[in-house]
């Protein structure tokens, strides 16, 4: 019974490049959430998606960041033209119904040089 | 904006001691979750509390939700080195779609 999977686990990018982070939710889960965790800070909500729909993107920066959860395949968090301040751990979580009891993946640690 | 304050921020104790960590807010939550996160990994859900005054036990861990559903506590009895980790509380606010997380309590249990 596979949990939430994220890849890559570690990603290094130079300033100006694009970062693509992937998340496969648990089987049977149709709700996906993305969070960012900075050192010394808590988990910050970025975006909530259901299949083919963005439900709430209020925590995601308006520029350079986008997310999708297509009908087939994993959810993708895309960061264009990365800057050093984007360096963080990005976590994906899934749930069967709504925000309660989310199950987290192992995270992708993004380092921008 | 809903905020969750966790205390203490850091806690270092010896194996066998008891401890309590707190999660407080001025906002009412429809549910509250506790997670534990180890270095380099994602948070792992420990428990969800829903009803004001609710108490749940998970082996040596006891979780309580405040009567007004604004605060919660986690009590660990006879702590073990395996309990070491970052303990996070997260509140569900009802009509919105996201969990609000506290910054966590970093617990170290020394052998």
Image (spheres, coloured by chain):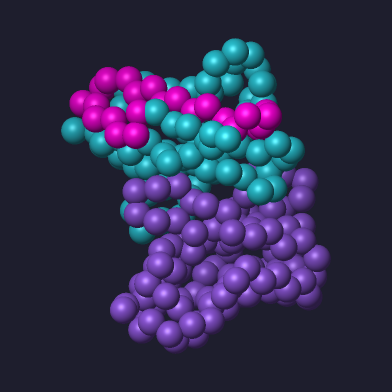
Chain colours: A cyan, B purple
Residue at figure coordinates x 34%, y 48% from the top left: B40
Residue at image x 37%, y 36%?
A: A108
Q: Residue visible at 39% across and 28% down?
A: A7
For residue B106, which quarter of the picture? Answer: bottom left
A88 shown above or below A15: below
Q: Is residue A68 above or below residue B46?
A: above
- Classify the position of the N terminus of chain B by image quarter: bottom right
Q: Quadrant of residue B81?
A: bottom left
> Is residue B74 among what the camera can see?
no
The image shows residue B108 at horizontal and vertical percentages of: 36, 73
Q: Does the magenta portion include A80?
A: no
Question: Between residues A81 and A78, which one lies in front from this camera angle?
Answer: A78
User: Was residue A26 drawn as part of the magenta stretch in this picture?
Assistant: yes
Q: Judge left or right: residue A14 versus residue A82.
A: left
Q: Nearer the viewer, residue B41 or B90?
A: B41
- Above or below, A2 against A81 in this view is below
Q: Quadrant of the C terminus of chain B?
A: bottom left
As drawn, the residue found furthest toward the top would be A72
Count of numbered tags: 0
Furthest residue in direction front, as rendered: A1
Bounds of the magenta segment: A8-33
x, y percentage for residue A26?
A: 59, 33
Q: Nearest the camera: A72 or A28? A: A28
The quarter holding residue B47 reads bottom right
Q: Does residue B29 appear to the left or right of B42 in the view shown? A: right
Q: Residue at x 31, y 27 (%)?
A: A82
Task: Return the x and y of residue A35 as percentages of the image width and height.
Answer: 50, 41
């Amino acid at each position: 019974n596979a949990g939430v999977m994220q890849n890559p686990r570690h990603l290094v990018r130079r300033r100006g490049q694009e970062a693509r982070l992937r998340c496969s939710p648990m089987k049977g889960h149709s709700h996906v959430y993305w969070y960012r965790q900075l050192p010394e800070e808590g988990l910050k909500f970025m975006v909530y998606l259901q299949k083919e729909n963005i439900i709430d993107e209020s925590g995601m920066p308006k520029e350079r960041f986008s997310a999708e959860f297509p009908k087939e395949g994993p959810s993708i968090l895309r960061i264009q033209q990365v800057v050093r301040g984007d360096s963080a751990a990005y976590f994906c979580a899934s749930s069967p119904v709504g925000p309660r009891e989310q199950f987290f993946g192992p995270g992708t640690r993004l380092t921008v040089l | 904006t809903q905020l969750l304050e966790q205390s203490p921020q850091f806690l270092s104790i010896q194996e066998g001691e008891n401890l309590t960590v707190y999660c407080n807010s001025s906002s009412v939550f429809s549910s509250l979750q506790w997670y534990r996160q180890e270095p380099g990994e994602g948070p792992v859900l420990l428990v969800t509390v829903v009803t004001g005054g609710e108490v749940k036990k998970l082996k040596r861990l006891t979780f309580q939700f405040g009567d007004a559903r604004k605060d919660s506590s986690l009590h660990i009895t006879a702590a073990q080195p395996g309990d070491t980790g970052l303990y996070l509380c997260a509140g569900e606010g009802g009509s919105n779609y996201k969990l609000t997380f506290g910054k966590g309590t970093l617990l170290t249990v020394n052998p």
